[in-house]
Amino acid sequence: MAEELSACERRPWVEATETPFVRIKGITKMFGDLAAVDDVSLDIYRGELFCLLGGSGCGKSTLLRMLAGFETQTSGTIEIDGQDMTGVAANLRPTNMMFQSYALFPHMSVEKNIAYGLLREGVPKGEAMQRTADMLSLVKLDGFAGRKPHQLSGGQQQRVALARSLIKQPKLLLLDEPLGALDKKLREETQFELIRIQEDLGVTFIVVTHDQEEAMTLSTRIGVMDAGKIVQVGEPREIYETPNSKYVADFIGSVNIFDGEVDLAAPDLMRVNTPEGPVMCEPMAGLTARQKLHIAVRPERIQLSRTPIEAANTLQGMVTEVAYMGNLSVYRVQLASGQCLKVTAANGLHEENPITWDEAVHIGWSAAASTVLVQ
Amino acid sequence: MKLRFTPIMALLGYIFLYGPIISLVVYSFNKSKLVTVWGGWSTKWYGELFANEQIMQAAWLSLKIGVISASVATVLGTMMAMVLVRFKRVRGRGIMGGMITGPLVMPDVIIGLSLLLLFVTVSGLLSELRTFEYEMLLSVFGDDVAKTLAQMMRTYFEYFPWPQGRGFSTILIAHITFNMAFVTVVVQSRLSDMDDSIEEAALDLGASPTRVFFDITLPMITPALISGWLLAFTLSLDDLVISSFVSGPGATTLPMVIFSKVRLGVSPDINALASLIVLAVSIGIIISALLMRKKPK
Amino acid sequence: MSNSKLARRFVIAVPNIWLILFFMVPFLVVLKISLAEPRIAIPPYSPLWEWVNGSIKFNINFENYAYMWEDSLYLNAYLSSIKIAAIATLLTLLVGYPMAYTIARAPEPRRSILLLLVVLPFWTSFLLRVYAWIGILKTKGILNAVLLWSGIIDEPLIILQTDIAVYIGIVYTYLPFLILPLYANLVKLDDTLLEASRDLGASRISSFFRITLPLSMPGIIAGSMLVFIPVIGEYVIPALLGGPDTLMIGKVLWNEYFSNRDWPVASAVAIVMLIIMLIPIMVLRRAQSKGAEI
């Protein structure tokens, strides 16, 4: 496993060089008249740590449960490692799940919880106990074998749940909001643990989360979901820098959105008319004149200064709020049109006279920083 | 003002609840048979109680029926609760729910009468089939075939498992039927409160649904099973009306004996019986309260 | 078929077959016999069909229903039962609501103890508890003894063998059935709602009537139905505590079967009782689905 390149390194999705490990084809799940999952198709490759990202009700948990076998799809097929999972009961699938509530068996010890899956497989007791001990070491819970779940802290319970789901070396591990119940610091530590374990064992992970920071940290690729559909799939950088819609741009990180119409497409630059004035962007093919679209500009790509700035796009405004976050400051700048922009700037050492409230400022950004969104 | 009014009303309520029970116990020690005369403390009524063959036999019968019907009802009721709460894609849930609510609210007289009529009808039907005449089949079959078929039918129904006459078995069947509904309600409540992701986790790890039930579900619903059993046992022990309808000669339950005695007026040996039951229940509750304390939540 | 599928079918089948056989079918039998004539025979009614001269003849007659309609006893008994059940339910509510309220507002561990004390009498015999009232309410009973001795009255009160004794008996035995669902509802009520009401200027009483009472409606309905429906058909309490004038349909049915040996009429009485009870049962089902706890 160590010699093989990780999914991050291989990036099979770019050129479709491998057969996808999990193929989700046209999956729809209806609850009455409501389509919780609406014609979703997705290919996930072996060794990936794939995140399904979206707000509540977007269908990500339902999709995960269909992969695990706890819900039956209304239409469509799921293939795992080439095998069609239609009609295969949950207890017979090569998947294991880590539940949001951990779902540890309250009347069994940590050891028995972890060994449960192996014993159901028919693994002899001695071997099962040995593998359980190894797994406890892997998740750094040696010595906790005899404890009961209610005697453990939240973080410890989470590790038992992880150990229990990994010990059977499933082809696919499904994680439902695995870090949701942990506090921030613990969450950060556990995120890297999770990545380490995943790369060590080479198991394919599919993680469901609503936390976009978590998705950005953990994933090889992210699938953003909204109202039952997959809106965009791509590596974290792709999703962040080139979102394909306003929804995705807004969901990941902070973003400033301008609404406008296509004005002029010159060879090097494109001009879009917005209430704030013309915005210059890099040209994009396939647009018609006066087509309505959005421009997204990330706060960190905007420069802020008391003096005029040399840039393709410049505006003037008034600083209405400043939040000092230590490593950077977040500014709210109100423009003449009334729209407020969010601008972040790194704090240098020894700022003599930092920009503060009610100051008139110039802001600017490059044409490349203007991301065009047609949806 | 409400704050004062309500607790006083509540206190009066509790006095109302316990007064009669206390009076039962106190008068079980009254040497005099009359309620208006206090004859001094005596335990003679307890002696009379235990010497009374009829009461003792009835008590034994009621205990047997109670234990058996409670146990069977717990099994059947748990099955039904699982079907109503856990099983997916079950058709006819509404009807099943109705069949469970029925015994809970239907008056005993109707349940008793309907079961009695069922037993009588089926017994009648069976005795007719046991003496089935082949002539009836002659319009369809030939002589020999009709005779053989008739003989087959007579033999089959001879061995058909159905209570002969009425008595122990019919009371048992009746009690199991209404007890089952109560157990279902109790277990159903516990099952729907339970986090079912724990059972899903067991499935996910490779356990078959049957395995999941015995490994995971059953240990987790055990308190509900115990309260269900106790409820069924109490209801069975206490049933007068239904037993009266479906019983037969030789099967007299404790409530039936008590009823026939108290229709005639106050009878202190019944007071003694009541006191013993109150004692048993109180001990039981204290024990269970202590056990609940020990368990970690 | 896999083992799991087989087990699943078994688990669905067994309890349902039992219930269909011993709960549903009996009602059909009652219906059938209500359409029969009484006979001196074993069993004492006419069969549904008979072989007469080689063909089937059905015996269906509605005489029993007509008889019930004509004889005022039955109509009066039904009406009287509904009336008694309604009044008794109301009385139980008046006694039980303050109790449920107090328990729900009490802090732990007192709350659990109070609840336990309400439930405890339920575990002792129902029959014996009704019997206890005989000793208390009879002419030479405890109540009269105390009242006479303390000089409050000169003549003993006649309570036993009247409707009043029946009311006392019903409230006494059915109290836990009302308190439990009501308590379950009240305990979920948010205290902050009442605080908000007080904060906005309402008095305690008006807060109760405008906030607590309406919100506890599902519990009130559930508890009331658990008393009202069974009491309509109650037999033991009117038999032991009521008098010959106490007209309840449960007693009538019992007498038709045990004393008159008239099974067809008893069946007809039962069928009509069931029809009457359908409405409150449906009310109960709706309250159940609205989240009232039983």
Image (spheres, coloured by chain):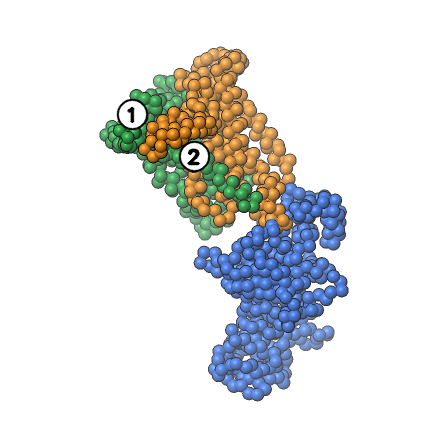
Asked whether A239 or A8 is in front, the reply is A8
Which tag, 1 or 2, sits closer to the chain's start? 2
Tell me, yes or no, if residue A371 can be seen here: yes
Q: Which residue is mark 1?
A: C38
For the point 54% across and 75% down, the residue is: A373
Chain bearing tag 1 is: C
Task: Tell me: residue A56, above or below residue C207.
Answer: below
Q: Which residue is mark 2?
A: C21
Task: Tell me: residue A286, above or below residue C52.
Answer: below
Asked whether B216 or A110 is in front, the reply is B216
| Chain in blue colour | A
Q: Secondary structure at mark 1?
A: loop
Mark 2 surroundings: few (<14), some (14-19) or many (≥20) residues within 10 A: some
| Chain in orange colour | B
Name the residue type under label 2. Answer: Leu
Question: x, y percentage for residue C110?
Answer: 56, 36
Q: Which hue is chain C drawn in?
A: green
For the point 38% across and 42% down, the residue is: C283
